Image: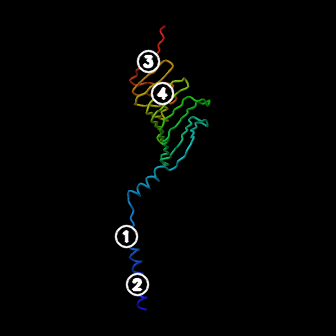
């Protein structure tokens, strides 16, 4: 009987020791935990092949299309388009007045600011085309602006500059430090 008690005591001691060893060896790597929570906090909502519209008085004013969209902040209503974006602006008759595309974009709805980066192209209904690497649309001001290099191609020639400001439909624009090749008719 003493051998049996000794055996049971030895097994209990071994199990207790193993449990203490397992519990003592468990730890959370704070960097690993932070990376997991960062990944979870990065995007509140994601979607692929998304089309968003913004209407004014019941009419579509802006239509946005993206291959991927991530809602980064619910509180600020911030959307990221990491794989590019196409944006169409409409007049009150439903006609497309301008088109913009970029390889990356982020929209801050609360601030009314849209940033477009990497191969940004804007065109209007007259056929004018803007090429730049960075552009900001200020929704409430109704303007698009950049302080980076621009190339504007029109029916009359090509204009280069170190920035520009235009109305959001890209009909009236002003180039900073403009230079280029123009066709001028003499009368």
Q: Is residue 128 visible?
A: yes
Q: Which residue is mark 2?
A: 9
In front: label 1 or label 2: 2
Q: Position of residue 172 (x, y in %)?
A: 49, 24
Q: Which residue is mark 4?
A: 130
Distance between the alpha carbons at the discs numbered 1 and 3: 75 Å
In front: label 3 or label 2: 2
In the image, is residue 139 above or below residue 178? below
Kind of element beneath mark 3: strand
Residue 181: which numbered mark, if any?
3
Distance between the alpha carbons at the discs numbered 3 and 4: 15 Å
Q: Earlier in the sequence, mark 1 or mark 3?
A: 1
In front: label 1 or label 3: 1
Which color scheme does this rendered protein use? rainbow
Q: Is residue 109 visible?
A: no
Mark 2 closeness class: few <14, some 14–19, many ≥20 residues within 10 Å: few
């Amino acid at each position: 009987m003493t051998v049996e008690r000794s055996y049971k005591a030895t097994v209990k001691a071994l199990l207790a020791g193993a449990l203490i060893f397992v519990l003592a060896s468990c730890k959370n790597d704070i960097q690993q935990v932070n990376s997991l929570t960062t990944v979870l906090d990065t995007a509140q909502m994601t979607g692929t092949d998304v089309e968003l519209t913004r209407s004014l008085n019941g009419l579509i004013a802006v239509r946005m299309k993206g291959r991927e969209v991530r809602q980064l902040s619910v509180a600020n209503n911030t959307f990221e388009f990491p794989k590019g974006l196409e944006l169409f602006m409409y007049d009150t008759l439903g006609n497309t007045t301008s088109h913009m595309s970029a390889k990356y974009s982020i929209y801050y709805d609360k601030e009314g600011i849209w940033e477009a980066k990497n191969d940004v192209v804007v065109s209007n209904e007259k056929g004018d085309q803007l090429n730049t690497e960075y552009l900001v649309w200020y929704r409430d001001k109704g303007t698009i602006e950049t302080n980076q290099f621009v190339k504007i191609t029109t029916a009359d020639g090509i204009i280069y500059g170190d920035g520009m400001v235009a109305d959001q439909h890209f009909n009236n624009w002003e180039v900073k430090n403009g230079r280029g090749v123009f066709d001028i008719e003499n009368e």
